[in-house]
Image (spheres, rainbow, N blue to C red):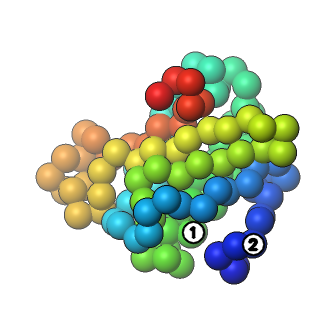
Amino acid sequence: MAANEKQLIAGKWIHEPQEQEGNDYWFDGRTLTTNGVSADIPDEELRSIIIYLQELAKVKNGLDYLQVFKKEDGDKIYVIDQITKAQVKEYPEHHYCTILYPSEY
C-alpha cells in the first residue's frame, strides 16, 4: 500500500497519515471504546480498524501511538495505544488501546 493511498476501512473510514513516523506501538492489547463511540459505531467497524492497525504495524515495524480515522462526512475518531511493545512486560495492566472521538480526548 502506497503511503499516500486512501484505503477505506470497513467501507467508511480513511486512515489519516501519521504525524510522527515509526515508534514501537502495535495496537495488539485489549481495546477499550468510549461510550460515545460504542453507541455510534458498530463493533464490526471497530474490529476492522484494529485489525487494519495491527497489520499495518507489522508492515511498518511499529506505528505512532496516535492513529486518526476519518469518514467522508467529517466524522473522526482517534485510536490511541497506551504503551510500546517494549513496555508490555513491565506494565501489562496498561496493554490496551482506546478508541474515542476527538471531543472525548
Q: Residue at x 77, y 64 (%)?
A: 7
Q: Is residue 28 visible?
A: no
Q: How many marks?
A: 2
- Establish if 65 lies above or below 22: above
Q: Secondary structure at mark 1?
A: helix
- What residue would you read off at disc 2? 5
- What residue would you read off at disc 1? 55
From this viewpoint, which residue is outermost toward the left?
A: 90
Foreground residue, 105 or 90? 105
Q: Residue at x 35, y 67 (%)?
A: 23
Amino acid type, mark 1: Glu
Looking at the image, is mark 2 or mark 1 nearer the viewer?
2
Q: Is residue 83 left or right of residue 78?
A: left
Please provide percent x and percent y for residue 14: 74, 54
Q: Residue at x 41, y 53 (%)?
A: 65
Please provide percent x and percent y for residue 21: 44, 69
Please provide percent x and percent y for residue 57: 49, 68
Please provide percent x and percent y for residue 52: 63, 61
Lower position in the chain sequence, tag 2 or tag 1: 2
Q: Are marks 2 and 1 in contact (CB under 8 Å)?
A: no
Q: Which mark is residue 17?
A: none
Q: Residues within 10 Å of mark 1 (few under 14, many from 20)?
A: some
Foreground residue, 77 or 51? 77
